[in-house]
């Protein structure tokens, strides 16, 4: 025992840092294997089943890491394995970037404690989501940015590679580059910066080609698909989330450190301003929709450095940080144990998945299950039961990557269970996770999702009460006819933001021939209730109990005031 203590006391600052990062990694590894998957993790596991250069919501890095981890281990641990490795790596890289020349053992301990007490890092150190890869590639970018600013050999090349890695991790990486350059505008005069951009663009060509093949779905979703009507609670919830995820004990110190710490290099200048830039940017974004707190995760390296650089020079602040950090770690230990064992019996997405989805699988009895709204439910069902599933995009919520999969077409002609609203249900299951699963049985499932409805004559602007003469061209790509007969109904749909949808059934009856096309002329009167709104307008095929999305691409239309 004395020998172990002596060895520990003789460790230098770098070795001590590596030791504590290793301890943290072991804790994350255990957590990864003993905690059930969160909703989004199951969704990204779905990505990994079919590797591609892009996915509806995200670039491909998260899928690649999940796939590689599952080649090494099974279950939840396999999904998360490589994500647990990223955290000690990026914290080590950050330490090497900001390490003082006179660093001591106390400095190394302080750095690890600040990082560990940053609540954002506690959660995103083991779950399989794109934010971990973004933090990893952000620190690689900062390292390359440091080399580039110091005019190191091939600095421009490493910078281009790092920017491409960020882009393949999460689209928010573009903000990291923007804010780093904005903090050091003189670098815009360096030709190497544009050479680095050319390298990045060349490496992104496969992803851009995927986007072009899929109608730029990711960009459309992130730029406009998340928009919603303004709500004050979006703003207040964002502010409260920022206070929590960056540790409320530390928040006043971040402000003081930002004012007191003077950057000594270009990378430190970037680290100083990136937290304020990220938080300010997403605070403005909260004016047009809900902002998830982890979107600001790239601010973490700057916050850790600011507090570390300030606290190491101020003994009273150091003592406060150590005490507050110890309290935070004790609380987080309790939270981590709750996530594994759930002694409080909480209802949350990381609990009771096997029992809940197992009950649905028992009711399905080998039949495919078509889920109605939550894209993660179908993914979790597949992960925890191995059963066949699909999730229909829901116009009253959002679309997702399931629209690019053909699972529903493989179910055509088979008997399936369909998740539906309570009023359309044949039966209801009460699940272990506290949710209800309402479903009906379709003995001959015939999807209509890929039917294309193109509209001619829809203007960019219209007035309430105006009668619009429209021609619909309807193409059926399926090998079976589709009857529009009341059971399957054609409706005009107007969608505003994420949640407002107005639908108006059309009095049309016809049969769409297999692999054929038909046309229909309609007269649509613009309803008064749409006055003063901007909408996506299109047409849908809908059936009672089923979810649906636009059939074909919607068009923008502005409805004038009454």
Image: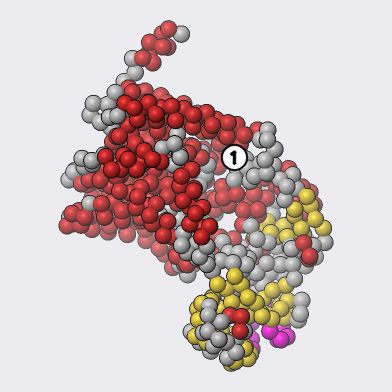
- Numbered disc 1: secondary structure: helix
Instruction: State the residue at coordinates (66%, 80%).
Output: 504
User: Relative to 92, is 369 above or below?
Assistant: below
In the rendered image, the residue lying farthest to the right is 426
Number of marks: 1
Query: Residue 6, how many percent across, how many down?
Result: 38, 10
Instruction: State the residue at coordinates (29%, 34%).
Output: 309
The image quadrant that residue 454 belongs to is bottom right
Query: Residue 447, how many percent across, how many down?
Result: 68, 69
Q: Residues within 10 Å of mark 1 (few under 14, many from 20)?
A: many
Instruction: State the residue at coordinates (58%, 64%).
Output: 398
Assess whether residue 511 is covered by the magenta stretch: yes
The image quadrant that residue 197 belongs to is bottom left
Front residue of this view, candidates 165 and 301: 301
Query: Residue 497, how many percent across, how many down?
Result: 54, 69
User: Relative to 77, is 547 above or below?
Assistant: below
* Residue bounds of the magenta highlight: 506-520
Q: Quadrant of the C terminus?
A: bottom right
Inspect this view and state whether residue 513 appears.
no
Front residue of this view, candidates 422 and 143: 422
Q: Is residue 132 left or right of residue 391?
A: left
Identify the residue position indicated by label 1 in the image.
76
Query: Residue 282, how many percent across, how many down?
Result: 42, 56
Instruction: State the residue at coordinates (59%, 45%).
Output: 38
Assess whether residue 136 is covered by the magenta stretch: no
């Amino acid at each position: 025992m004395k020998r172990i203590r002596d060895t520990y006391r003789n460790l230098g600052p770098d070795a001590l840092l590596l030791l504590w990062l290793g301890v943290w990694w072991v804790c994350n590894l255990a957590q990864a294997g003993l905690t059930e998957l969160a909703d989004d993790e199951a969704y990204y596991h779905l990505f990994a089943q079919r590797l591609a250069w892009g996915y509806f919501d995200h670039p491909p890095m998260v899928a690649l890491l999940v796939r590689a981890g599952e080649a090494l281990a099974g279950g939840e641990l396999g999904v998360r394995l490589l994500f647990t490795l990223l955290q000690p790596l990026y914290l080590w890289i950050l330490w090497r970037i900001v390490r003082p020349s006179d660093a001591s053992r106390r400095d190394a301990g302080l750095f690890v404690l600040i990082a560990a007490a940053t609540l954002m890092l506690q959660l995103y150190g083991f779950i399989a989501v794109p934010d971990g890869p973004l933090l990893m590639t952000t620190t690689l970018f900062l390292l390359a940015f440091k080399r580039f600013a110091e005019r190191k050999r091939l600095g421009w090349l490493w910078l281009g590679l790092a920017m491409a890695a960020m882009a393949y991790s999460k689209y928010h990486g573009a903000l990291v580059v923007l804010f780093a350059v904005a903090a050091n505008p003189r670098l815009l005069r360096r030709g190497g910066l544009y050479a680095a951009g050319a390298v990045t663009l060349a490496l992104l060509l496969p992803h851009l080609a995927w986007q072009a093949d899929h109608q730029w779905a990711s960009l459309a979703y992130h730029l406009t698909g998340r928009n919603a009507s303004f709500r004050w609670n979006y703003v207040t919830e964002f502010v409260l989330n920022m206070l929590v995820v960056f540790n409320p004990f530390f928040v006043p110190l971040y402000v003081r450190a930002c004012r007191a710490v003077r950057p000594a290099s270009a990378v430190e200048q970037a680290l100083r301003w990136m937290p304020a830039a990220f938080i300010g940017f997403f605070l403005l974004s909260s004016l047009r929709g809900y902002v998830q707190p982890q979107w600001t995760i790239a601010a973490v390296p700057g916050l850790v450095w600011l507090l570390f650089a300030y606290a190491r020079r101020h003994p009273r602040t150091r003592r406060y940080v150590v005490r507050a950090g110890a309290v935070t770690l004790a609380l987080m230990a309790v939270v981590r144990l709750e996530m594994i064992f759930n002694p409080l019996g909480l209802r949350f997405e990381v609990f009771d998945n096997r029992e809940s989805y197992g009950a649905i699988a028992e009711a399905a009895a080998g039949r495919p299950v078509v889920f109605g709204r939550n894209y993660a439910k179908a993914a979790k069902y597949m992960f925890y039961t191995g059963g066949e599933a699909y999730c229909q995009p829901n116009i009253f919520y959002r679309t997702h990557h399931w629209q690019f999969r053909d699972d529903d077409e493989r179910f055509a002609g088979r008997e399936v269970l369909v998740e539906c609203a309570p009023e359309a249900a044949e039966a209801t299951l009460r699940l272990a996770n506290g949710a209800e699963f309402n479903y009906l049985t379709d003995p001959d499932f015939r999807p209509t999702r890929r039917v294309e409805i193109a509209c001619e004559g829809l203007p960019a602007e219209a007035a309430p009460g105006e009668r619009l003469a429209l021609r619909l061209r309807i193409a059926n790509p399926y090998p079976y006819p589709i009857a529009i007969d009341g059971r399957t109904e054609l409706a005009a749909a107007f969608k505003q933001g994420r949640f407002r949808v107005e639908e108006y059934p059309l009095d049309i009856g016809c049969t769409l021939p297999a692999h054929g096309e038909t046309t229909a002329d309609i007269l649509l009167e613009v309803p008064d209730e749409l006055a003063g709104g901007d909408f996506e307008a299109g047409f849908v095929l809908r059936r009672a109990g089923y979810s649906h999305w636009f059939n074909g691409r919607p068009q923008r239309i502005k409805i004038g005031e009454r």
